[in-house]
Amino acid sequence: MAIRIFSALYHAAALWVMAWGFSNLNTLATNEWIEAQLGGHFQFLTIQGLALAWITLFFALTADFIPSLAFAQRAKRLFLMISLPLAMVISSIYWGLLLTFPSLILPPLPSSEPSSSSAAPALARIPLSLDLALHASPALSLVAEFFLMESKYSRHDVVYKAPIMACLFGLWYSNWVEYCAKYNGVFPYPFLTDNSLPGRIAIYVATTIIALTSFRGLNAIHS
């Protein structure tokens, strides 16, 4: 039984990059502050998206080594239906805000000394290599996976399955992050902290719509 060498190398490399990114979260200036909170790093949509992308590509790698294992291929395709649009949302929102309004996406650096300065606090920026591993590699890897190694989804998948999965994940994350913030007193993302409940609900709904729209768009241009 032949192993799909090129595909396996690609999947292994993508998995390594994402695992490296996750393993280096403890090097962030905000790590102690985050880990002391309920939910830790898994409050962040980025980390949940990273985990789903990793699971998707793990099933893909399993299918490379055992092509006859139909379960691995089916599982990969199912997870891809949510991990791909989620990765697109994460990358587009993160990089868009980072380049235009970084204070909405990056928390201030933790400070042990109070300051009376009116200057804006320094932001907790992420080293570029780690930033790319967390906020770019999942989207790039999954887009390549979809267009190079997967067939497009059926109309039934697009019209029924994808909306259900997107809505379920949207409900899960919005309830989870609200629960964590109620305990922690702050949201993982400043743009959520700065908004009232109606504003946050609008953000959750808009994000879900963007995810579903991106999935439909990518599927539509897939040959």
Image (cartoon, helix red, strand yellow):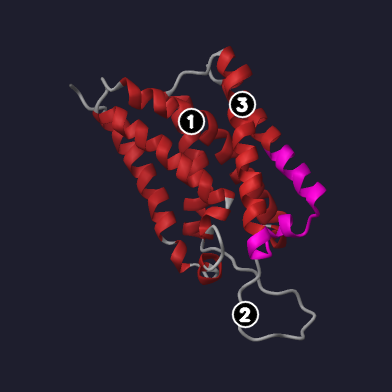
Q: Dot 1 corresponds to which residue?
A: 80
Q: CA distance from mark 1 to mark 3?
A: 14 Å
Q: Residue drawn 59% across and 65% down?
A: 125
Q: Dot 2 corresponds to which residue?
A: 111
Q: CA distance from mark 2 to mark 3?
A: 43 Å
- Horizontal relation, residue 201 to residue 19: left or right: right
Q: Residue drawn 46% across and 62% down?
A: 25
Residue 107 position, x and y percent, is: 65, 65
Among the two numbered marks 2 and 3 on one chain, the one whose residue lies closer to the N terminus: 2
Residue 187 included in the magenta stretch of the image: yes
Residues shaded magenta: 182-207
Image quadrant of residue 161? Answer: top right
Among the two numbered marks 1 and 3 on one chain, the one whose residue lies closer to the N terminus: 1
Residue 23 position, x and y percent, is: 40, 58
Q: Dot 3 corresponds to which residue?
A: 164
Q: Residue drawn 57% across and 53% down?
A: 44
Among the two numbered marks 1 and 2 on one chain, the one whose residue lies closer to the N terminus: 1
- Horizontal relation, residue 11 to residue 148: left or right: left
Q: Amino acid at mark 2?
A: Ser
Q: Amino acid at mark 3?
A: Ile
